[in-house]
Amino acid sequence: MIPFPAPRLLLLGGTLPALLGATVPTPTSVLVEVDGLRSARGFVQACLTADPVTFPDCQKDPAALHLTVPAHDGETLTFHDVMPGRYAVALFHDENGNGRMDKMMMVPKEGYGFSRDAPVRFGPPTFRAAAFAVGGTQLRTAIKVRYLL
C-alpha cells in the first residue's frame, strides 16, 4: 500500500481556489471628498460601516472604520483596507472639537452628511439609502455637508 502524501494535499488545498479560477477578495480604498464645510475650525469625524443595524452610529460597530481629520473643505478622507461588500459612510463637522455631535433640542448644531447624499427626513437615513458597493478597485465618492442651525 502506498501512503497518501498529505502534506502535498494541504499545500494544494491552499491554492485550490486559484487553480479552479476563483478569485480571492483583496482589500481596496474608499476615498470620500468632503464638500460644504462652513469653516476650517475643528475636525471632520467619519465612519464607514457594513452593519445596517448600527448605522449611522458607528460607535456601536466594532468592525467600523473611523477617521478624524482637521476640517478643510474639499478634504479627501481615505479609508484603507476595505474588503468588497456594501458600506455606508456617516460624517459630521465637529467644529468645537469636543468629539461628539452637538444638538439643540434634538437638532444637530454641527454639519453632517451621508454617503449617496442620503436624505434626512425625520431622523437619519437608513443604511439602505446610504449604502454603496465596494468591489476590488478603489472607489471615490463625495459627501455634501449640511447644516440646520
Image (cartoon, helix red, strand yellow):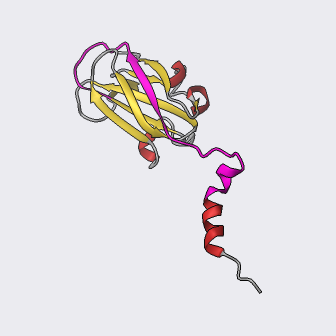
Q: Give the quadrant of the N terminus.
A: bottom right
Q: Quadrant of residue 81?
A: top left
Name the residue located 28 percent from the left edge and 18 percent from the top edge.
72
Task: Classify residue 70 as left or right of residue 134.
Answer: left
Q: 53 or 71, which lies in front?
A: 71
Task: Classify residue 37 as left or right of residue 64.
Answer: left
Task: Classify residue 126 as left or right of residue 48.
Answer: right
Q: 41 or 12, which lies in front?
A: 12
Q: Say whether residue 20 is magenta.
A: yes
Q: 54 or 19, which lies in front?
A: 19
Q: Mark yes or no: residue 64 visible.
A: yes
First to last magenta residue range: 15-44
Q: Is residue 132 above or below residue 148?
A: below
The residue lying furthest to the right in this view is 1
* x then y, percent, for residue 75: 33, 20
Name the residue located 41 percent from the left edge and 43 percent from the top edge.
59
Name the residue located 61 percent from the left edge and 60 percent from the top edge.
14
Q: Mark yes or no: residue 121 visible.
A: no
Q: Quadrant of residue 136?
A: top right
The residue lying furthest to the bottom in this view is 1
Q: 26 or 87, which lies in front?
A: 26
* x then y, percent, for residue 34: 38, 19
Q: Say whether residue 18 is magenta.
A: yes
